[in-house]
Image (spheres, rainbow, N blue to C red):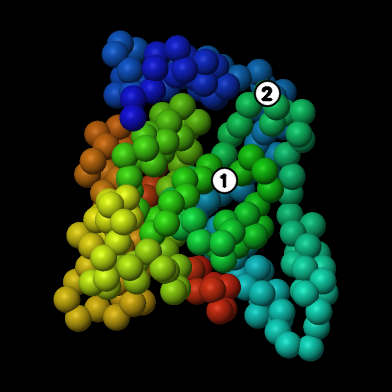
Amino acid sequence: MTLSRRLLIQAAGLAAGALTVPKLVNGHAKAAAMAPALKQTLDACTPPSNPLQSLLERNQRFSKVWESLGDGITPQERMALKVALFEEGCQIDRLALAEGQRPWAALISCADARVAPEWIFSAGSGELFQVRVAGNSAFDDGIASLEYAVAVLQVPLILVLGHSGCGAVKAAMDSKPLTPLLENLVKPIRASLQSGDDLTKAIEGNARYAAGQLSQRSELLRDAVASGKVTIKSAYFDIKSGKVSIQD
């Protein structure tokens, strides 16, 4: 997907700094400086240091609560415990969000209903730039969206998040016939499969493969990684424990 020059310039007006993005459009478009007061408000929830470490620290707090939501309490009590954790977090001013965004991390995660990044990482609106698709694969429109996140929004981290029991990976490993559209969906997942892998290994391998595809298929992302402007990592979310583990 190619962003139009008009769309890019409009979006760039909401970004901080002056980042040239020639890979997205013909010619050059530079991000206009965001008003300092708006920038400060939008940065209110941005971690002061390593964004990856911040995601993991937030997830540790989530997983402790998640593991406590067992038998003996009602669904409403479970939700109350989750909300109590969420309320310890941070929320950017809604009026500032109506004017722009400055997410500090981007994710490719699965469309699975059990995978909710805002909960997993205790993040409020405006913090995480998200691309979601069954199987968390690096599809064209998803990569283009991340190009936008890096070039215009200057996101410093992209995390590809696989998860336990992924149905899309199961389908890719199976020989049962699928609809034409589902066949297209699992095609990149099948490219990641290794002979002899069980489902967990296949899910982890698929996340690694998707993370690698981002810089292989996008010159913009490849250059951003090389220059140190963005870090790309893959991870595995275990639904039972609620824990996210980063893959080397």
Q: Position of residue 91 (x, y in %)?
A: 74, 45
- Residue 108 on image: x %, y %: 44, 51
Residue sitting at 39 percent across and 17 percent down? 4
Decide: is 102 above or below 26: below
In-front residue for pair 157/241: 241
Q: Residues within 10 Å of mark 2 (few under 14, many from 20)?
A: few
Q: What residue does disc 2 label?
A: 99
Front-most of residues 116 and 221: 116
Say which of 235 and 37 sits in front: 235
Quadrant for residue 236, please give it: bottom left
Q: Is residue 121 left or right of residue 168?
A: right
Q: Which mark is residue 128?
A: 1
Does residue 33 sit above or below 160 in this rendering?
Answer: above
Q: Residue at x 33, y 45 (%)?
A: 139
Residue 223 is situated, as x and y percent measured from the top left of the image, at 27, 35
Quarter of the image with the N terminus in it: top left
Q: Identity of the amino acid at label 2?
A: Glu
